[in-house]
Image: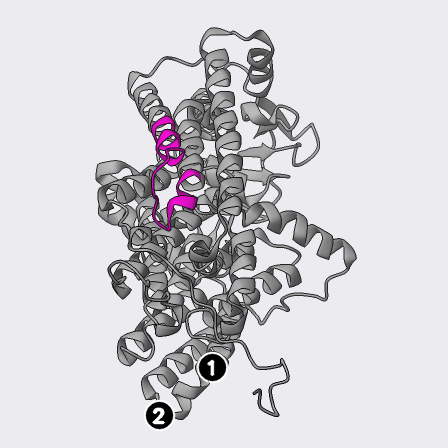
Amino acid sequence: MSSAFSHGQTRRPPARPALQAGAVGKLPRPLLLLLCLAYILPGFLGRDPWRTDGLSFAVMWQMAQGATDWFHPHLYGYSIHGGWLAHWLGAWSIQAFGAWVGPVLASRIPFMLALGTSMSLTWYAAFHFARHDAAQPVPPAFGPPIAPSDYARAIADGVLLTLLATLGLLGRGHEASTQVLQLAAVSAVLWGVSLQPRRPWKSAAVIALGLISLSLTSAGWFALLLTFTLAFLLWSELRQGGWALALALAAGLFSGAWAESQLGWPLHGQWPGLHAIGNFFRIGIWFTWPAWPLALWALWRWRESLRARHLQPAWALALLALLSALALGNNDKVFLLSLPPMAILSGFALPVMRRAGLAAIDWFAVLLYSLLALVVWVLWLAMLTGWPPKPAANIARLAPGFHLSLDPFTLGISLVATAAWAAIVIWRTGRHRHPLWKGMVLSASGVTLAWVLVGSLWMPALNYASTYRAVGASVAHAVRTTSALSMKVGTPCLKPSGIDLTSQALIGYWSQLDFSNANTANCPYALGAHAPGPATQWRLIWRGGRPGEREEPLFLYQRLTPPAP
């Protein structure tokens, strides 16, 4: 007989998945590491600094040369605000490794490590979250019991594969700039929270490191919001005398406030309108794919356990990052911070996911990434041979003057990656039992395949159209030739004229010439989109630009009359 308090309204017990022992099979570590390396390296190797990360690289280079202050850096007279940690790490790496691998690659080593660190910390965070009792599956009625560590490892493998599969991580995650460090910092905070309350001091140290790193990468405002969020999530630990945690949150509070005070306490965010909300869903759907449908399914299937320790931190941090991105006008750099917690949520959808849902994601991945691979190969063939003619003509229009030469090494890598993709598709579609992480294998492998093919087959053309190397060399040659003819000695400077700071930074690095923004600077040359003064005072000596910016040429002028005193 039902009690007086039930009447059909008794609270349902928390849902827990029912699994067999074969569902927690281990993903071979060498294959997982190889997949991560194949994902990390192509975006950082084989290219010059582009506009997306050129300004950061120039500041690192100036710091490494001792040409600017490390706490208040300046570049050609302009103050560079924030991003301290990214600039410091890049400058230290240039000083340590620049003589061996070159300044460009040396500046990217910390960010390659940061991306790998984010992957590793997200894996460990998911592993510790999945070890909680509320996250464990129901013991099987028949067969051997499932070890908690085996289940947690299978969940963590699925989380890492989901993180690799997210489309938004591709571009923003492969830039030598602050957002990669912020991504690693958020992953560190998640790992620290997952260690509570088993290892309180280690947890507090990791949380403090993550919050301070956010503050030192121009995200002090996010560190403050995250500190208050963690205080709410971990309030019970704080009330029970968690001094280590309290010190960690205090470090996040003070570092965030200090960072914002250095930036002048800028106002962050605004109330979004309907247009901003529409763009939020438009950008978020592709940026967080395929994590968002899995995360929503996990929240639904585990809805009785939303306040459990293995779910609440992940959805709270993901919600904080998504709302922050919306308030900041759908900033994709902030969208990036939602990926680690959303991937962890997605991992808990895998043991409760229906077979039809996983099959739909698999078929989407097979069709999408096979088509992308085909497109990459066809366009590479067009660049190499001129056939098919229409794609070859489009490439010639976008990168005029580019001629592709056959590189056996990159061709071999691309062939191996394509063959590996075919083998994974055959394995995944086989009629045999698969572990939990099987549903994310095709998506993660497909993204990696497309990234490897683009980074090997397309990178020469992309770098040709995007680099300032040829522009800097041409400007330097024109300046030195004109100076020699004018019998002037010394290193002349350039006066910018309608050219942004990023372009100045990249041209200045490749030309080894200095820009001066002082109004009284006695610069014999000017570079920009137009002449800096009357035609009677300046003479045009060079015209050019990047192949990808034919409609925005640059002009180099020589001063004809001395500047006014």
In this view, the residue farthest toward the front is 1
Amino acid carrying label 1: it is: Ala
The x, y position of residue 373, in whole percent, is: 47, 25
In the displayed structure, 137 sits above or below 468; it is below
- The quadrant holding residue 433 is top left
- Taking depth in this image into account, of 303 and 46 the one nearest to the observer is 303
In this view, the residue farthest toward the right is 274
**Helix, strand or loop at mark 1:** helix
- The quadrant holding residue 501 is top right
At horizontal 61% and vertical 48% (from top left) the residue drawn is 285
- Taking depth in this image into account, of 129 and 272 the one nearest to the observer is 129
Scheme of image coloration: one colour
* 325 sits left or right of 373 in the view: right
**Which residues fall within the magenta stretch?**
422-442
**Helix, strand or loop at mark 2:** loop
Q: Residues within 10 Å of mark 2 (few under 14, many from 20)?
A: few
The x, y position of residue 188, in whole percent, is: 36, 64
At horizontal 26% and vertical 48% (from top left) the residue drawn is 95
Residue 440 highlighted magenta (yes or no): yes
Question: Could you tell me if the residues under marks 1 and 2 are in contact, i.e. CB atoms within 8 Å?
Answer: no
- The quadrant holding residue 42 is top left
In the displayed structure, 531 sits above or below 382; it is below
| Disc 2 target residue | 241
Residue 490 highlighted magenta (yes or no): no
At horizontal 24% and vertical 60% (from top left) the residue drawn is 144
**Label located before the other in sequence (1 or 2):** 1
Spatial distance from mark 1 to mark 2, Cα to Cα? 13 Å
Residue 231's label in the rendered image is 1
Residue 68 seen in this snapshot: no
- Taking depth in this image into account, of 244 and 89 the one nearest to the observer is 244
Amino acid carrying label 2: it is: Gly
In the displayed structure, 549 sits above or below 257; it is above
